[in-house]
Image: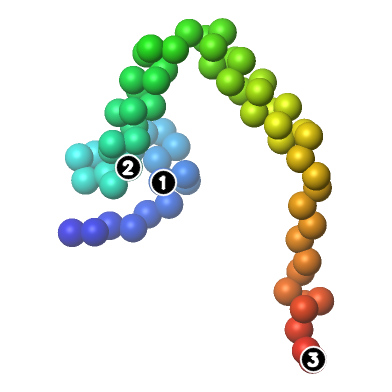
Amino acid sequence: METSIDCATACVNGCVLGDDCPNREYAASATKFIDNTSLDQIHDIAEAARRRKLSEPPKWVIPDFLDSDS
């Protein structure tokens, strides 16, 4: 049985699907990463990602109503 839920909102306090969770494999790999990576390394990874994001050019989003032919 395939259940479709928004995990970001429904599982804030823990997984609501338990063993039926389609993202279970990702949780295991995330737990392994956290267990095997020091907090300093995690901080360095986050800081590098933040610097990359700040150095990217801005992304412009054109609203749909400007793109209509009406």
Q: Residue at x 81, y 76 (%)?
A: 66
Q: Amino acid at mark 3?
A: Ser
Circle number at residue 23: 2
Q: Residues within 10 Å of mark 3 (few under 14, many from 20)?
A: few
- Residue bearing mark 3: 70
Question: Which image quarter is the N terminus in?
Answer: bottom left
Which tag, 1 or 3, sits closer to the chain's start? 1
Disc 1 + disc 3, Cβ < 8 Å: no
Residue 26 at x, y = what percent?
34, 35
Q: Residue at x 38, y 12 (%)?
A: 36
Question: Which image quarter is the C terminus in?
Answer: bottom right
- Residue bearing mark 1: 7
In the foreground, 31 or 5: 31
In the foreground, 55 or 37: 55
Give the number of marks. 3
Observer able to see residue 28? yes
Residue 57 at x, y = what percent?
80, 44
Disc 2 + disc 1, Cβ < 8 Å: yes
Residue 42 horizontal side relative to residue 50, left or right: left
Between the C-alphas of marks 3 and 2, the distance is 43 Å
Where residue 13 sits, quadrant-wise, is top left
Q: Amino acid at mark 1?
A: Cys
Observer able to see residue 16? no
Which tag, 3 or 2, sits closer to the chain's start? 2
Residue 45 at x, y = what percent?
58, 20
Mark 2 or 1, closer to the camera: 2
In the foreground, 6 or 58: 58
